[in-house]
Amino acid sequence: MTAMNSTAPQSSRIVAVTGAGTGIGRATARAFAAEGAHVIAIGRRSGPLEETAAGHDRIASLHVDITAEGEPERIVQAVLETHGRLDVLVNNAGIVRSGALGTLTPEMITAQLATNFVAPILLTQAALPLLETSSGVIVNVTTSVGQRAWSGSSVYAATKTALELLTRSWAVELAPRGVRVVAVAPGAIDTPIGEHQGLTSERMTAVREWQMAHTPLARIGRPEEVAWAITQLAAPAASFVTGVVLPVDGGAVVA
């Protein structure tokens, strides 16, 4: 049976994080770097990526659109040329285009499918030879709301729920090849994802109030708390953990 943990020490691993310009992605990149890993912070916007890397000499930014044709292969080639290996891939990038059924446009649907679902598949597929060589780890970032109904954001929840099914399926499929696959499912976290979808400050306040009312711990989580879960599941000490989806949501799923 193949050993299911990266052969690289925790302090020298190579980690790629998508959606690393803000929020959970930024916190995750910095958390891995703080452990001594070399991190490739991937995102669409160069400015936020530079902010993520500022003051962290172990973080290098890679400005790409992961949904563009040929970009997954370019990302993997850049990692290979720079570091020669890849130990952890964090599929974190995600977008929300809220809308109730009857108001959804083809662009709203396809944009979320492209970023939240298709891109992780193609990037993981491109990175698989490197991950297999290193006995690496794939971490998918989903959403705890995907385990419940989410009126008004059903397409977003559906894409993330699909990513959870991929997590379980890949865990079984890749276990014989020495690759672990896990997922972290955040709940209400203090990130700019609402602003990115164009919500007004008044609307965001209403959303946050609703979220806190439905979260037993009665607060909004911090990106660093999700990053902690990601780094722990990806750690060599978690070498017997695969196929799990870990909610980081203040108890929202079980309430």
Image: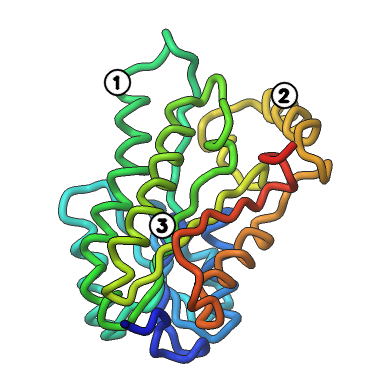
Q: Residue at x 44, y 12 (%)?
A: 101
Residue that protrudes farthest toward the top in the picture: 102
Between disc 2 and disc 3, the foreground one is 3
Residue on which disc 2 sits: 202
Residue 144: x %, y % from top left? 59, 42
Hey, what amino acid is under mark 3?
Answer: Asn
Q: Disc 1, disc 3: CB below 8 Å? A: no
Q: Residue at x 34, y 61 (%)?
A: 172
Hey, what amino acid is under mark 1?
Answer: Pro
* Image quadrant occupied by the N terminus: bottom left
Q: Nearer the viewer, residue 2 or 226?
A: 2
Circle nearer the N terminus (2, 3): 3
Q: Residue at x 58, y 53 (%)?
A: 23
Quote the CA–CA distance across marks 2 and 3: 31 Å
* Image quadrant occupied by the C terminus: top right
Residue on which disc 3 sits: 91
Circle nearer the N terminus (1, 3): 3
Q: Nearer the viewer, residue 221 or 204?
A: 221
Q: Is residue 215 left or right of residue 140?
A: right
Residue on which disc 1 sits: 106
Residue 24: x %, y % from top left? 57, 56
Circle nearer the N terminus (2, 1): 1
Residue that protrudes farthest toward the left in the picture: 70
